[in-house]
Amino acid sequence: MSKYYLNYLDELESEAIYILREVWAQFENPVILFSGGKDSILVAHLAKKAFYPSKIPFPFMHVDTGHNFPETIQFRDDLVKELGVELIVGSVQEAIDDGRVAEEKGKSATRNVLQITTLLDAIESNKVDCAIGGGRRDEEKARAKERFFSHRDDFGQWDPKNQRPELWNILNGKHFEGEHFRAFPISNWTEMDVWNYILRENISIPSLYLAHQRDVVWRSNSWIPVSEYLTLEEGEKVENKKIRFRTLGDITITGGLESDADTLEKIVDEVSSMKQTERGNRTDDKRSESAMEDRKRQGYF
Amino acid sequence: MAIDNNQLLRFTTAGSVDDGKSTLIGRLLYDSKAIFEDQLDAVAATSKRKGHEGVDLALFTDGLRDEREQGITIDVAYRYFTTPKRKFIIADTPGHIQYTRNMVTGASTANAALILIDARHGVIEQTKRHAFIASLLQIPHVIVCVNKMDLMDYSEKVYNEIVSQFEEFSAKLNVKDVRFLPMSALDGDNVVNKSTNMPWFKGAPLLHTLETLHIGSDLNKIDARFPVQTVLRPQREGFIDYRGYAGRLASGILRPGDEVVVMPSGFTSKIKSIDTDKGALEEAYAPMSVSVTLQDDIDVSRGDMIVKKNNQPEPKQEFDAMLCWLHNDTAKPRAKYTILHTSNEQKAMIKDVVYKIDINSYARLEDDNELAMNSIARVTIKTTRPLMIDEYRDNRVTGSFTLIDSATHETVAAGMIV
Ligand SMILES: Nc1nc2c(ncn2[C@@H]2O[C@H](COP(=O)(O)OP(=O)(O)OP(=O)(O)O)[C@@H](O)[C@H]2O)c(=O)[nH]1
Ligand SMILES: [Mg+2]
């Protein structure tokens, strides 16, 4: 092989850096949507590279549902401090208290959909014109349709049937006041790529991704962590298992899997032999066939 | 894992509506075991609900609600898979003429195009349109897949006829590497596994071809072109006077000590360092993203291009290009557009429509100069300031541009400089 050929991880890295720099150059007030999950941690890491030796020029924006893993919040605060970036928090709890949104009722109630209002409010009140996300096309079938620069109208809505053509790597971020963009620098990364890269770069991640002992309950095909928000249902019992989480969302809906993978190497090995997709256990995606598309149209991540 | 040394191959599907593009991608993913169990379960359930016999393989890429309802692809879907030999990024594009803009989007970054033809219909107008676009985009490798052979008794004669039909018109195109393959995407004949129904076909199945295409020489390694995206001024301890020009090499190689010119200003200097967060590099090559510092303090900003002194692109304010019109609004004569070219942005005008292409005969129509949705034409572009351009043939990055309607901000056209 020629010496002047990048391997695929370097190529993906270079593409992501290119996109992050375009965001910086084309927008007035961009933010990184930071959830504390591995994909947004990766985006933060790539942003550090893209602007080195300068600091990351974007604030982080976290949409806080109030239903967090304490570890995620700790991780977020430590990283923000280390990088010296500003943190903007949009609070779903506040939106509920203000009556902007109403808590879902019933057995499978979550705050997942409620995040949309808080996200759009935070984007509007902070005059954000581009929100950088860690969405990947391999995650979900509607996400597979995203552009790198994805237009949102002044209601924050996505119109998947009418996306701007995006040729080569020429990115068009032009918009009217009130509209914004979502930018997805790691669009082309797969879950496997993310883990291989985290391993290669030795990026630190919340301990929740590594196998650990935890009190859990078996519910809709995965181990749901015991927390102050969990109400046990009839017939459910708390067990202590060695588990790890493959994705991180709200503590109320993120299912863990039994695992011994307590190092990055073991995670890479484990993920490469997985038979289910990483979102396979996310109840938020399972509500209907087009659950993700419907939420995205309204302004979801 | 050995995969670390793997090359990335980006390929796209093309061809008319219902020729089986999405089915082929579904089959390719399925037979190469790149489908997860829960994805398969979900698609199987939807197929059943829609009364489809077996699993509708197209549903692995047709992910939008409207696509599933109508059974067509509307926008590009990107899918990923890896074999021990290579890593692939697939862009499955729509065949419907109304969504040609999305086909162009998916095809613009591809190293290879799979052009599908329904064996029952042979070459039709949309096949020609997509083949023409693939050749305009200079996709280096084209694989023509004659699909649905199961509906034509796997006939060698039918296949040969379609091959000659394609060759007849493709002789007028500029594609270097064209290959042909008879297949049934539905049944998996010649997709991952060799077909037992077509023993007369001696070639390898599709996956093998994709794994072995030689792509190393597709990149331009000669002409160093470094469009500046932004300037890095850290203003912090240890870097007080640091001024780095951030960008991604479009082509070629740069090394510290190289004599360079900053265009369009024409100032010359030498490369002092090429930096990344992991330290300085001895050389950088396309498509690496780096930060370059120069020995002299000169004015450089976004839109400028750093090139080698002995190999410069031509700064031009007027040039010809092949243009694909991608929007419902027709082009307004002598109207002003915004042109995006590398990191540069200027105002531009379509000064002249030299000729339009008749997509059926590839004839040049010199009297017709209306640019409407899906028109392909040779035009003369005039810009307010010079752009640092190369011919698209030599450089896919510095030879391409898009036009934006300044009133609506919509991307209306894609251009390839000739
Ligand atoms: N018999 C037979 N049918 C096929 C084959 N390949 C595809 N089909 C059928 O052709 C129809 C269209 O297939 P798609 O894969 O959706 O076609 P497409 O090219 O992706 O269509 P657009 O994306 O809308 O342009 C479906 O009903 C498929 O089942 C094949 O090899 N043999
Ligand atoms: Mg299709």
Image: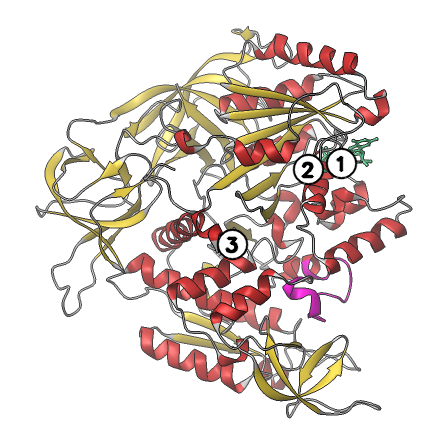
Residue interval drawn in magenta? A277-292
Quarter of the picture containing the C terminus of chain A is: bottom right
SS assignment at label 2 = loop
Q: Which chain carries label 3?
A: A
Rate crowding at label 2 as few (under 14), some (14 to 19) or many (20 or more) other CA atoms within 10 Å: many
Picture quadrant of residue A237: bottom right
Q: Which residue is depicted at the point 79% across and 89% down?
A: A236
Kind of residue indicated by mark 3 = Trp
Q: Left or right of B373: which side holds B2?
A: left
Q: How far apart are marks 1 and 2 (CA)?
A: 7 Å
Q: Is residue A268 shown in magenta?
A: no
Q: Mark 2 lies on which chain?
A: B
Residue A288 in the image: state x and y as whole percent.
78, 62
Residue B108 in the image: state x and y as whole percent.
50, 33
SS assignment at label 1 = loop
Kind of residue indicated by mark 2 = Val
Question: Ligand 2 is located in which of the four quadrants?
Answer: top right
| Above or below B376: residue A104 | below
The answer to whether residue A176 is visible is no
Residue A221 in the image: state x and y as whole percent.
76, 75
Q: Left or right of B111: which side holds A291?
A: right
> To which residue does mark 2 refer?
B192
